[in-house]
């Protein structure tokens, strides 16, 4: 029977961007709402501030992810171009380099040489990109994918505490937003952990912890400024 294996490494690129975006959307918007509410702002002002935070945050996430991942992509492209030139001008040196890599991983020198020769004959550039540079297809930088995933998930995450703010009375905003946001964060951490093959409790708890810290910090700042303003 054919042995079938299921791996999750192909999800790393979009999963990282998606989790980061959703987490930031929930945490930053909930913290912003709680901070402004703690300062004594009106319900309308809190909502307007939250919407502004959603829009600006989503655009910031998209721009930041695109620039960051584009830099990674540019670096990978430059390394590939350099490796292509070296393979064309120094093929024997590159073969020795590949042999040394396989030897360092535990193969005997003779076997490492055979493997290097065969992989070079099959696809020299792919062999060097994978084994020398550490660039593999499932991990390749995709700037547009990362930007869209971050912006979209940030907006979805930010919409959750905003919806809670919209449906609750102004006097209960802080409590409801804090509790529901923690539930959202724990669920997000659990789903991300499950998608990545990690433990649910570990994923949920670490996301919730940082969410509590962020909301508490902004609540304290909002309260202090609210007292001063009063």
Image: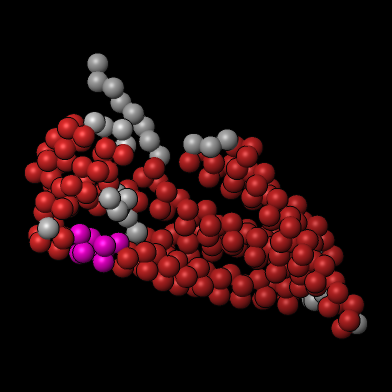
Residue 164 colored in magenta in the image: no
Query: Is residue 73 shown above or below 92?
Result: below
Task: Please check the rendered image and state whether residue 81 is part of the magenta-colored stretch, yes or no.
Answer: yes
Identity of the residue drawn at 21% across and 64% down? 82
Q: Nearer the viewer, residue 63 or 130?
A: 130
| Picture coordinates of residue 123, whole percent (x, y) | 13, 47
Viewer-nearest residue: 82 or 34: 82
At x 67%, y 44%, the residue is 205
Residues in magenta, as a range: 76-83
What quarter of the picture does the C terminus occupy?
bottom right
Instruction: Give the quadrant of the N terminus.
Output: top left
Which quadrant would residue 147 be assigned to in this image?
bottom left
Residue 186 coordinates in the image, percent (x, y) = 65, 46
Q: Residue at x 69, y 63 (%)?
A: 30
Q: Is residue 60 above or below residue 80?
A: below
Q: From the viewer's perspective, is 143 left or right of 159?
A: left
């Amino acid at each position: 029977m054919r042995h079938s294996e299921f791996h999750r490494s192909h999800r790393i690129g979009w999963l990282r961007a998606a989790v980061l975006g959703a987490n930031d959307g929930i945490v930053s918007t909930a913290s912003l709402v709680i901070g402004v509410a703690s300062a004594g702002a009106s319900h309308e002002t809190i909502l307007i501030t939250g919407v502004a935070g959603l829009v600006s945050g989503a655009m910031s996430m998209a721009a930041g992810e695109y620039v960051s991942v584009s830099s990674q992509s540019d670096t990978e492209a430059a390394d590939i171009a350099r490796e292509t030139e070296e393979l064309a001008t120094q093929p024997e040196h590159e073969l020795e380099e590949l042999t040394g890599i396989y030897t360092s991983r535990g193969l005997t020198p003779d076997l490492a040489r055979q493997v290097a020769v065969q992989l070079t004959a099959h696809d020299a550039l792919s062999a060097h990109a994978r084994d020398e540079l550490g660039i593999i297809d499932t991990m390749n930088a995709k700037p547009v994918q990362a930007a869209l995933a971050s912006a979209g998930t940030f907006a979805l995450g930010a919409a959750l505490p905003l919806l809670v703010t919209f449906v609750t009375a102004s006097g209960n905003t802080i409590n409801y937003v804090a509790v529901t946001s923690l539930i959202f964060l724990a669920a997000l951490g659990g789903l991300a952990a499950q998608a990545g093959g990690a433990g649910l409790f570990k994923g949920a708890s670490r996301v919730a912890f940082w969410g509590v810290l962020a909301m508490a910090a902004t609540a304290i700042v909002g309260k202090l400024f609210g007292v001063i303003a009063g």
